[in-house]
Image (cartoon, rainbow, N blue to C red):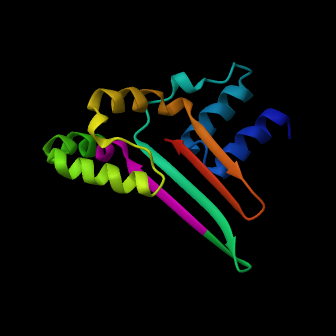
Amino acid sequence: MNEQRKAILDMLAEGTITATDAERLLVALEAGEPAPSAAGRPKAKYLRLAVEYVDNGEPGRVNIRVPLALLRAGVRLTALVPPQALEKANTEMAKAGVPFDLTQLKPEQLEELVNHLDEVIVDIDSSDAQVRVFSE
């Protein structure tokens, strides 16, 4: 098996690409065409968080798939939350070590983030866990 084919199958096994993307890449590879880039993929619809871990010798897995439409709706809903409630939430998050200001969250900022999500993959490996954050 050549290296490019193995890399495509590894990405599919890891969940980095969908089966449809893998098929398209393999067909392009077999035809001798350059493989399509991420720019040729449809826009991301989901934010994924996948965690594989070992706890007391037992393997575990968490797989979260959040529709980006839900994130957009949540940002729009912050406009309906009273400023005092947002300030209290900011204070509690800061106490927990999350320096995030909900009063500064704007829908256009989320759209900019969403537009760039298809270019982002975060992999964190340790001896007892693997965390992956990506879009699909």
- For the point 35% across and 33% down, which residue is it? 110
Looking at the image, residue 75 sits to the left or right of residue 116; the answer is: left
- For the point 27% across and 39% down, which residue is it? 103
Looking at the image, residue 117 sits to the left or right of residue 30; the answer is: left
Q: Can you give x and y, in whole percent of width and height, for residue 70 in the image?
A: 30, 47
Q: Can you give x and y, in whole percent of width and height, for residue 121 in the image?
A: 60, 39
Vertical side of 14 occupied by 105: above or below: above
- For the point 73% across and 29% down, which residue is it? 30
Nearest to the observer: residue 31 or residue 103: 103
User: Does the magenta run of residues contain 70?
Assistant: yes
Vertical side of 126 occupied by 70: above or below: above
Nearest to the observer: residue 94 or residue 69: 94
- For the point 35% across and 57% down, which residue is it? 92
Q: Can you give x and y, in whole percent of width and height, for residue 29 in the image?
A: 72, 28
Q: Which part of the image, by quadrant, shows the N terminus?
A: top right
Q: Main secondary structure of the magenta part?
A: strand
Q: Can you give x and y, in whole percent of width and height, for residue 17 in the image?
A: 59, 42
User: Does the magenta run of residues contain 68?
Assistant: yes
Q: As drawn, which residue projects farthest toward the top?
A: 33
Start and end of the magenta stretch? 61-71
Q: Image quadrant of residue 72?
A: top left
Q: How many numbered circles are shown?
A: 0
Looking at the image, residue 52 sits to the left or right of residue 100; the answer is: right
